[in-house]
Image (cartoon, rainbow, N blue to C red):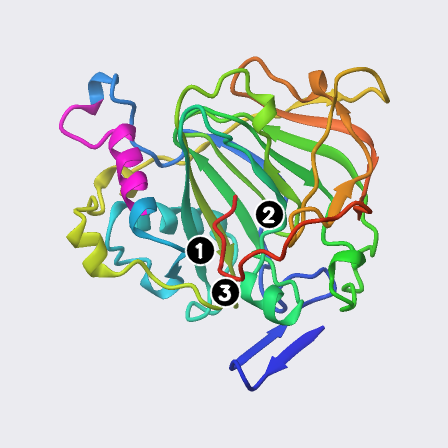
């Protein structure tokens, strides 16, 4: 499947699995969770004296979120010279997940990164969505996904949910065909639920439906801050740009630091499996989603108890097949075409 446009100087070719064609050999697309990802130590750690702490990194993220209006880009060829610690973290994520992959063009590959900051007492959730080249979807109705989507948690807060197997169905493709290797009506039989804790990092297939569930957290009295980084190979999303050097220096963003350069490998963590019973009380409604906000919904609700975790763990909730269907009671307005920052 290919798209070629002279008007916007863009050529995109997808393989049968709906990924960018001709790259990604050796990449691990399975869901992974790791602790102690390259982030600074907590401020309470005695070893943190005379070096940046995770609170410093959170302040950096909040400053960056304030001065930027869109997602940011760091090209693979520029990763040896990051302008600030946040670019250094983005580069570390890209290198970590592509270490077994060398079949990509560094000129068109890179990491798209941004900050999600949610204030205490507010709705800290995020509607279900697929990560994609937003401009390509808006202007041409086509889906180009990152190879991987990643979340690095800097605080605690409400959980991220990922629907394993739920790629974009035919009803959401604006009349364009479904890649040959994908089902036009995909089915999810496992839902990953990741509860945040500082330094925790998750990565998953960039084609999967996911979001943030506000109603699954018992408390929202603290700010939720995450660092989002999507790994792109052989495709640069249209409209993204690098963090301007004058912005990094003018707002005093922290320069690259040794804690990222010298950090040991992350520590893989286990996922706790649960089986969701069919039916029952207190069922969790995942809500509606889509470009108008209410185009689609899921066919099933799951017991809230099966999605809950008392700590900062990660769950795999096995369930009967969940599919995406059209919401027959739509009423939303077309959203702005600007590139939205989503998780």
Upstream in sequence: badge 2 or badge 1: 2
Upstream in sequence: badge 2 or badge 3: 2
**Residue, x 83% and y 16% (percent of image)?**
280
Horizontal and vertical percent for residue 281?
80, 15
Q: Are marks 2 and 1 in contact (CB under 8 Å)?
A: no
Upstream in sequence: badge 3 or badge 1: 1
Gap between marks 2 and 1 measured at Cα: 18 Å
Q: Residue furthest bottom?
A: 6
| Residue 50 lies in the magenta stretch | yes
Horizontal and vertical percent for residue 282?
75, 17
| Residue 199 lies in the magenta stretch | no
In the rendered structure, find residue 28 and report the number of the disc placed on it: 2
Label 1: state its secondary structure.
strand
Q: Are marks 2 and 3 in contact (CB under 8 Å)?
A: no
Q: Which residue is mark 1?
A: 112
The reply, left or right, for residue 269 in relation to residue 156 is right
Q: Which residue is mark 3?
A: 237
Q: Mark 2 or mark 1, which is nearer to you? A: 1
Q: Count neighbours of disc 1 (C-alpha within 10 A) and say few if under 14, some if 14 to 19, many if 20 or more.
A: many
Q: Are marks 3 and 1 in contact (CB under 8 Å)?
A: yes
Label 3: state its secondary structure.
loop
The reply, left or right, for residue 176 in relation to residue 38 is right
Placement of 46 over or under 63, stated as above or below: above
Placement of 197 over or under 172, stated as above or below: above
Dividing the picture into quadrants, the one containing residue 144 is: bottom right
**Residue, x 49% and y 53% (percent of image)?**
340
Dividing the picture into quadrants, the one containing residue 44 is: top left
Q: Residue furthest left?
A: 50
Q: Mark 2 or mark 3, which is nearer to you? A: 3
Q: Count neighbours of disc 2 (C-alpha within 10 A) and say few if under 14, some if 14 to 19, many if 20 or more.
A: some
Magenta stretch in the rendered image: 48-64
């Amino acid at each position: 499947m290919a798209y070629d446009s002279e008007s916007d100087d863009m050529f995109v070719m997808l393989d049968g699995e709906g990924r960018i064609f001709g790259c990604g050999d050796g990449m691990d697309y399975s869901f992974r969770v790791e602790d102690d990802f390259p982030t600074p130590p907590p401020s309470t750690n005695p070893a943190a004296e005379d070096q940046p702490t995770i609170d410093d990194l959170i302040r950096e993220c909040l400053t960056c979120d304030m001065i930027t209006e869109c997602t940011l880009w760091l090209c693979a060829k520029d990763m040896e010279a990051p302008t600030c610690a946040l670019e250094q973290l983005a580069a570390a994520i890209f290198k970590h997940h592509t270490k077994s992959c060398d079949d990509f063009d560094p000129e068109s590959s890179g990491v798209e990164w941004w900050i999600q900051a949610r204030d205490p007492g507010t709705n800290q959730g995020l509607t279900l969505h697929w990560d994609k080249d937003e401009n390509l979807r808006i202007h041409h109705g086509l889906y180009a996904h990152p190879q991987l989507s990643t979340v690095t948690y800097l605080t605690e807060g409400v959980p991220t949910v990922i629907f394993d197997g739920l790629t974009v169905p035919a009803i959401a493709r604006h009349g364009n065909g479904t890649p040959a290797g994908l089902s036009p009506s995909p089915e999810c039989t496992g839902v990953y639920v990741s509860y945040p804790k500082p330094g925790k990092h998750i990565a998953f297939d960039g084609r999967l439906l996911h979001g943030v569930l506000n109603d699954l957290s018992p408390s929202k009295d603290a700010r939720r801050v995450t660092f989002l980084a999507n790994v792109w190979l052989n495709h640069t999303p249209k409209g993204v740009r690098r963090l301007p050097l004058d912005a990094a220096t003018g707002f005093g963003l922290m320069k690259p630091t040794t804690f990222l350069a010298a950090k040991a490998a992350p520590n893989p963590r286990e996922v706790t499996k649960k089986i969701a019973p069919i039916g029952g009380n207190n069922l969790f409604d995942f809500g509606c989603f889509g470009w108008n906000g209410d185009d689609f919904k899921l066919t099933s609700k799951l017991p809230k108890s099966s999605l809950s975790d008392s700590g900062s763990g990660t769950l795999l909730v096995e369930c009967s097949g969940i599919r995406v269907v059209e919401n027959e009671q739509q009423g939303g307005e077309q959203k702005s075409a600007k590139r939205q920052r989503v998780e």
